């Protein structure tokens, strides 16, 4: 029932007008009508094949329109966020986030009938939904994953006169503004049950929405193996630069190989253009190889990550170049690390000192 009609049939003064048998009859009729309408929805394999043949060779043209590649955040409390879209040859959309768990006070999953009531009645809403993944554009681009939804809890508790309940709402997660930057998760929501004298009886905690890490490698990409390293695979160049250009097959770099980066104040948002060049003597074909370019703060915490792929077509040569952007909120002075990894292997690492301009 919708909220308005549910309140009518639950009115104590009207209970005699809506006996249980009448409500069951309404439900059976509604389900029967749904099934009758549903029979017209599916399409046959033949119709699907005809649609594919008719679409073969067709092009899609989008003009004077705004295309939103970013995934949407979950629209229901505790729902996972949508993965980010991607445009480009071989581009991949991000993975959608998982929904949050809904449990009782002891962390056990709710029985199906209680879970259904929790969801349709409005219950105690979960702390929040997962955020949407960021979009990506370019050959081999990978959209960001959607964040997982926050958890929910449903329970009953015995209350004595004078008991006090205090609730602490977790801070919402922060979105990112820089390429490859990891978003921050939402904070936990905490309910504390105390006696009238202030003694804590029990604390109930549910996790806030999770943030997805940027730069996840697609499941069908392979990481660099020991055999690849034996075949001479290496990162020959990893450097930030000011600007670059490709001319007659050559890469021209201006203002490269920084050792320091000055900022007007901290925190400060900035994005760095990065050149990563790999080379090899022999690489076996057969699968896309994935690498990750990562940025860490002086404490060693990873704050940003970009995924890049080595396409099969590149194996006809002996090297490959990725010009990418990676950014972060530089919130402290010190040595920030930039490195390239693939699977269990750290392939290259440099340090750049962040300093506030005098």
Image (cartoon, helix red, strand yellow):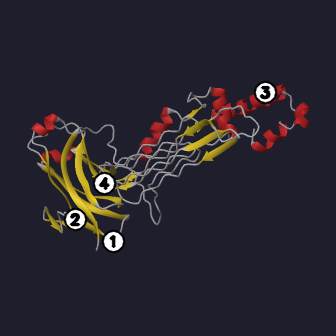
Q: Quadrant of residue 242?
A: bottom left
Find residue 192 and name its label: none
The residue depicted at 11 percent of the width and 48 percent of the height is 318
Name the residue tied to disc 3. Answer: 24
Q: Earlier in the sequence, mark 3 or mark 2?
A: 3
Residue 253 lies, in percent from the top left, at 16, 66
Label 1 sits on residue? 264
As measured in the structure, the alpha-carbon distance from the residue carrying label 4 to the one carrying label 3 is 61 Å
- Regarding mark 3 in the picture, which secondary structure is present there? helix
User: Which residue sits at x=54%, y=35%?
Assistant: 101
Q: Of helix, strand and loop, which one carries label 2?
A: strand
Query: Which comes before the other along the chain, label 1 or label 4?
Result: 1
* Depth order, front residue of 64/307: 307
Q: Is residue 34 above or below residue 168?
A: above
Other-residue count near label 2 (Cα within 10 Å), few / some / many at <14 / 14–19 / ≥20: some
Q: Quadrant of residue 261?
A: bottom left
- The answer to whether residue 253 is left or right of residue 85 is left
* Crowd around label 1: few <14 · some 14–19 · many ≥20 (10 Å): few
Identify the residue under disc 2.
Answer: 260
Q: Earlier in the sequence, mark 2 or mark 4?
A: 2
Residue 310 visible at all:
no
Outermost residue, front side: 197
Q: CA distance from mark 3 to mark 2?
A: 73 Å
Q: Quadrant of the N terminus?
A: top right
In terms of image quadrants, where is residue 106? top right
What whole-number distance in Å separates the C-alpha atoms at marks 3 and 1? 69 Å
128 lies left or right of 211: right
């Amino acid at each position: 029932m919708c909220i308005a009609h549910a309140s009518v049939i639950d009115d104590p003064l009207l209970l005699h007008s809506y006996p249980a048998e009448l409500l069951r009859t309404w439900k059976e009729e509604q389900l029967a009508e749904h099934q009758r309408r549903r029979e017209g929805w599916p399409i046959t394999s033949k119709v699907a094949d005809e649609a594919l043949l008719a679409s073969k060779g067709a092009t899609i043209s989008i003009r004077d329109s705004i295309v939103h590649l970013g995934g949407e955040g979950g629209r229901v409390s505790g729902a996972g966020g949508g993965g980010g879209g991607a445009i480009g040859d071989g581009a991949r959309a991000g993975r959608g986030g998982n929904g949050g768990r809904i449990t009782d006070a002891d962390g056990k999953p709710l029985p199906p009938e209680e879970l259904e009531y929790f969801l349709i009645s409005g219950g105690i809403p979960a702390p929040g939904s997962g955020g949407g993944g960021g979009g990506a554009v370019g050959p081999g681009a990978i959209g960001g994953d959607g964040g997982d939804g926050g958890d929910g809890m449903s329970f009953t508790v015995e209350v004595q006169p004078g008991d006090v309940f205090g609730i602490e709402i977790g801070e919402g997660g922060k979105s990112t503004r820089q390429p490859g930057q990891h978003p921050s998760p939402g904070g936990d929501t905490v309910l504390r049950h105390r006696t009238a004298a202030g003694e804590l009886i029990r604390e109930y905690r549910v996790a806030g929405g999770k943030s997805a890490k940027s730069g996840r490698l697609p499941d069908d990409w392979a990481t660099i193996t020991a055999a690849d390293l034996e075949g001479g695979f290496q990162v020959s160049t990893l450097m930030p630069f000011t600007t670059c250009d490709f001319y007659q097959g050559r890469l021209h770099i201006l203002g490269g190989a920084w050792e320091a980066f000055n900022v007007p104040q901290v925190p400060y948002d900035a994005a760095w253009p990065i050149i990563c060049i790999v080379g090899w003597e022999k690489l076996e074909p057969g699968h896309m190889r994935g690498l990750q370019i990562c940025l860490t703060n002086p404490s060693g915490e990873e704050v940003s990550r970009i995924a890049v792929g080595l396409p099969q077509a590149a194996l006809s040569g002996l090297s490959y170049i990725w010009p990418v952007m990676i950014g972060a909120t530089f919130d402290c002075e010190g040595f920030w690390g930039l490195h390239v990894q693939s699977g269990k292997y750290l392939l290259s690492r440099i340090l750049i000192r962040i300093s506030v301009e005098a």
